Structures are given as structure tokens and as C-alpha cells.
Image: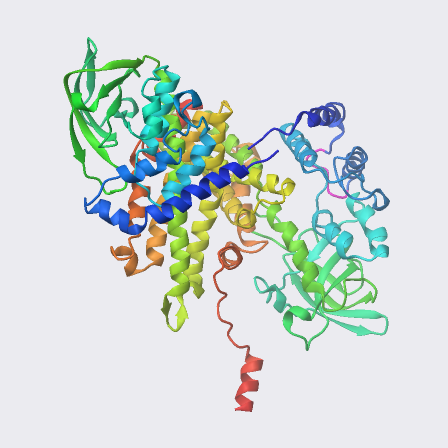
Amino acid sequence: MEFGLSQDQLMLGDSVRKFLASEVPLDKVRQLAAGETNDSSVWQGLADMGLAGLIIPEAHGGAELGMLDAVAIAEALGYAACPGPFLSTAIMSAYLLNAAGATDPLARMASGEYRVGIAFSDVIGSRKGQVVEADSKLTGQSLFALDATADAYLIGLSDGRVFMIEASEVTRSSLSTIDVTQSVCELSFDQSPACLVSSDAELVWQTIYRGRAIQAADTLGAAQYMLDQAVAYSLDRKQFNRVIGSFQAVKHMCAEMASLLEPCRAFAWYAGHAFDESTDDSALTACHAKAHLAEVGQFVAKTSTEVHGGMGFTDLVGLHYWFKRIGFNRQLLGSPEAVRHEAAQLEGLC
Amino acid sequence: MDLSYGREYDAFREEVKSFIRSHKHKQPKPGDGIKSQAIRDWQSLLIEHGYHSRTIASEYGGYGAEPDIIKSRIIAEEFGAERVHRGFNGQGVTMLTPVLLEMGTEEQKKAFVEPTIKAEMIWCQGYSEPGAGSDLASLTTKAELDGDEWVINGQKIWTSTAHHADWIFCLVRTEPDAPKHLGISFLLFRMDTPGIEIRPLVDMTGDANFNEVFFTDVRVPKHQIVGQRGQGWQVANAILGHERGSLATPDAAMNRLNGVKRLMREESINGEPIMSNPVFRDRLMKLEGRVLAMQYNDMRLLSAKINKNQDVRLAGMIVKLIGTELRHEIECLGIDVMGEIGLSYGDNPHMRGHGSWQYQYMFYLGLIIGGGTSQIQKNIISERGLGMPKEPKIPSEKSAEKSAKEA
């Protein structure tokens, strides 16, 4: 019996952390925010380390690793607020295309040259607009599609079918959100030719559950960063002739963050492991992990900012990029209330 | 990650299941008191089969097995699943016995361990005092040596089972001039010693779960001390470590949460089951997510007992804080599901589940405070877990006077 990351998984996480520490410093995030750079060089760097093809079979140029490996990596990416389509291309699209037997794009995805975005809002619950299909042509609108610079998109329809379409066949406009580290766009279709990838509604949901497990791990990493920053700041900042970290009010804020966050580590690991072992509770666990991390993440994001006082509110320390990343993960692929409702359905409670 | 216990444990699990099947009918009934023969017989049966005091050496009355975390876990799982009585686990069993085995003399181990684990000798714990709660080391109950006897004067509080106890393990100040942590000793003595008065302390549940205990010139043989004079604080801390983790197990929380689910299906407003109300359901699912996090945290802690290279200090430190607060909220949801029926208490004929939701809701508030309050837990987590500094010490009156004189 061993509950935890293996030596290989620890080493993988460490190497990603090292890469991100040198390649994605806060300045890089600021450049992204200012529109002075995009995520392509970072993504190519991560692809060269094998992250783009992480779960893609070796036969298609991937590393053929599992979801627990992906969780370990997502935690490192969240910690650095790293941009790039890990969630969309490397996890959700790679999983769906491979499971559906549409393996042609996988090798190019694994090498980092081809990005496949995700437009599943009709499946999860559309706020506005809908995409309809007739004769393999799509018409309509999909909001908040993941990855504004993808080469192609997987479009999930409300009946659970999934179509693939090249970016050149759609009208695409990038959507600004609070979070500059993850890109989303609006896709408009007008009799746009698309290719049916899957008619299996269960498959699209299995893809969404995997995405949620990864989001949970990403939030875990981002929240851990915010907690580490809060503790470090509290040991540096002095008021009333004492470091503020010696005041119980501040210590208790940090203890509360740590107490809620630490069990989330085991939770995220299990969520990844459950997919690797195909346990009966994998879908339920992913939903719970995503919703629970959304709540804990929100608490940590707020509390860490407060520990920083006025500086936390400014752009100077840049803490807000993590605050916003946690906020982004909370809403995308289902808000916590919506996801908990699904969890209740999965349990047959409603 | 490997969550299987291994095939070699399958046979052991079968053994436990078969024991439960053939002996379940002998377990104590809910009304059996802690001094009943039924409890003692069950306790002996469990020890004889290795389901209690499993790793305590047979020369001290235990089963004498090698420690095996997985086997202990399987026993807990099977007894939990069948809701079978786990045997008597009073403070003497869970807190004193490990300390005696680690720090007691050979005579003490021989004299006390066997009757304690067999529930023939019931203990209470004399730690807290009216003026020494979170700051336990400031306790003032004093013991002075007079010939071959300690003479004890003072008062303890929050002493559970004092009215049933045959013996007490007690912290007393024996070195009044030493710094506060170095002046304490750990004594053992009989509760029927002249000079001991017990007053029950009725709490918010309506029960007297605790007592006040008064000592007036209580005379105790000199050798009934564990560790050396002045070492009592070290001994006490070894015990508190045992206490904290056991107050809030996530598996018990999940059992209660499943109880809330049943309640939500059974209870209704105007014929509409509570389970179909999305507001209640969201509260339920939120709590379920929190319990799951603690269950996986618990598996991580279990794993670290087997694989010593895993660092789980922080994961362990937070269990008492989060576990007790979480349990309190689960019980609270149970009450809210019942609405005004959840107010029922005592002999109210409309009560559900013998009033356990109301009772546990209050009892767990007691546990949030007892065994190191939530606020003390946060101090420990921030200082030992996150490396944050202690509050600066305010000089005591004595030392302030002293430095004023010197000036």
C-alpha cells in the first residue's frame, strides 16, 4: 500500500518546476498581460519536455503516462501560473481523440506543433448561443472555448456528439477575461464544415471529468503559491516593531489556509489515480475535487491577498495573477454549484 | 500509488469477518456501563483474538503481535462496516497505556497495563485546572513530599469518568521553584484515597460528561510516579499526541454524512422530501467534498506510517482542527434537515435517531474546545507547520517585579 506520488512522479514535477522557475518568471506573466508575448514559446518548451504528449500513446509519439502524472504536472503549472494549452490540448483533446480512435492529429499534438482547443459549453451548460449541426456543417456560436490560438477545435454539441473543425473554418475572436494566463475565445460557425469525431455522450463527459481533475490540481498549485507567498511576506513585513507573522491574527489566517489546502493534495492525487485505475468513483471524485478546490482556492486567494495588506491589492507584487487564475478555474468547465449538482446526480440523489 | 492492501491480507480480512460473524451476538448492549461484566468479557475476547491491544506484549496482557498498520486498518474497517463494538477505549487504554509502555518502570507496566486494557481498572485524567487550560503548564495543584508520601492539594477540572474511575493519572507541581515546564510530575493514585472529592459538571448536552475533582491532603506513596520528578510535562505531551488524532476520524464523519443522506430522504416539508430541495442538497454535497478531502488525507497519513520517507507532518497536524469543525457542521445539517423537529430533546416523542444529531452537535462543540482548542491548533500549525514565530512573551508579574527591583 502506498498513497502518494512515486519517485518518478516527484522527479517529473521537480523538473517541470525548475523549467518554469527559469522560463516563466513573473515578468513573463506581465508581458503576456501586456500583450507583448504569447504562450507559444513556453508551450514548445513544455512540449520538448514531453508534456504535450504526456497521455498520448507511445505509438503516436507521446509518453503514454497517466492522469496521476498529469495531476502532478498541473499542480506545478498552477504554482507558476503558467500559460499554455495543457488542459485543452494535452489532456482533454488528447484523451478524447485517442479514445475515439481519431489518432491522426496525436503525433503533431505531442510534438507541440498542433493545438486542439475545446468548446464544450453546450455540453456543460450554455449561457448564450448554441451550435447546431446539419449535414456535417456547424452553425451557431460557442463562447469561452479554451485556447484562443489553437489550430483546431473539438466542438461538443448538446446531444453529446463531438465534431472537430480546423480554426481556418471558423470565425474566431479572442475574449478578454480576468485571467491573462489562460486564453479563451468565441467561435462563430456558419455552415462550417466539420468532422464527426464521437457520437458517444459518455466519452465527452469522461473528457470533462478529466479536465476537472486537472483544474483541481492547477488550483491546488496556484493556492499553494499564494499560501507560500503569504507566509514569506508575513515574515518579512514589520509593523509595531514586529514581523506581522508573529501576530496571532495573521498566524491563524495562514494556519486556516494550510489546514484547508493540505488535504486537497491527497484529494487531487486520488482524483488522478481514480482515472488510471478506472475506479467506480472516478467521475464523482473529479467533480468533488473540482468543486472543493474551487471553494478552498477562493478562500486562500482572498486570505493570502489580505495577509499582504495593501500591497496584495496592487500590481506591484503581482499576486493577483494567481488570484485570477484560481477564479478562472472556478468557473470554467462548470461552477462549483453546477458541478456539485452533477455530483448529486451521479450519486442518484436527484 | 498503490491502494491495494495486497493479496496476503485477504486471508486476514476473512479471519476478521468470520470472527465478527460468529461472535457478534456477544458484544455489549448500548446500556451496558463501563464497569459491567459484559464489557469486560467482550474486551477479553477481543484481546484473545488480537482485535484489541494487538501489539501490546503478552507478558503485559496484550495479544503480542508485531505492529502491522494494514492489519490494524482492516480490523477497523471490518468492525466499522458491521458496526461492531470496538471494545473499551477509555483514557487509561488509549492514553496512559502507551505512556507506561514507553516511560514506566517494569513494576508499573506489570501492575497496571493488563488490568487497564482488560477494562478491570478504569482511569481518569487529571490535567486541566480552572486556571490552567490552554496554558496547561501553569497548573498549580501541588504535591509535597512528606516522608515516603506525596501530599496533594489543589483542583482539577474536565475530568471525564472521574466518578467511575478506580485510579487517576495526574499532573502536579512538585518543584515550585523550577521554570513552569520543568516543575511538574506525573503521579498515579487511587480515586478512593481519602481527601478526594468529585463534583459532576453538567454541560450543555444535559449530561455530566465531566467532573471537578478536589484534592485535600491526599496522601500517595512516593514511588507512584511515572518518569522522574519534574519530567511530567514530557510524559503529558507524549499522551496529548495520542489524544489529538483520535478525536476526529474521517471515516466516522462519512458515516454521519451518510446518516444525513438517509435523513434527507426520510424527512419532508409538505410531503416534499428534503433531498429534492437543491439548497439542502448543495450543503450536503459541499460537506461531502470536505469529508472526502479528509479521507484521502487520512490514507496519506496511513501510507506514511508504512513508507517512512513521506513527509506528512502538516497533513497530520490539521486533523483535529478540521475534523472536529467538519463534524460539528455535519451534525448541524442533520438538525437543519429536521427543522423544528430538530429542536426535540429528552422525552420528546417526535425525536429522530434518539436525538443524536442534537446531542452530537453540542458534544462536538466540546471537542472543538477540548484536547487543545481550535485556536491552539492554529498556533501549532502556524508555528510548527509553517515556521511562523511564537507570540512574544509578556514577562510574568514575578519577573517584572524582580527587574523593577534590580533597576
Image position of B86 (left or right of A203): right
Q: Nearer the viewer, residue B361 or A2?
A: A2
Q: Does the magenta-highlighted stretch encompass residue A141?
A: no
Q: Magenta region: which residues?
A: B29-35
Question: Which residue is at the far top?
Answer: A135
Percent coordinates x, y for residue B191 in the rendering: 77, 57
Q: Nearer the viewer, residue A190 or B337?
A: A190
Image position of B340 (left or right of B96): left
Q: Main secondary structure of the magenta part?
A: loop
Image position of A169 (left or right of B306): left
Q: Is residue B343 visible?
A: no
Q: Residue at x 58, y 81 (%)?
A: B398
Percent coordinates x, y for residue B103 in the rendering: 76, 57
Q: Does the magenta-highlighted stretch encompass residue B30?
A: yes
Q: Is residue B116 visible?
A: yes
Percent coordinates x, y for residue B50 in the rendering: 77, 35
Q: Nearer the viewer, residue B67 or B54?
A: B67
Q: Nearer the viewer, residue A195 or B200?
A: A195
Above or below, B147 relative to A161:
below
Percent coordinates x, y for residue B363 in the rendering: 56, 46
Which quarter of the picture shows residue A307? bottom left
Q: Residue at x 53, y 77 (%)?
A: B395
Above or below, B257 relative to B381:
above
Q: Considering the image in quadrants, where does the N terminus of chain B appear?
A: top right
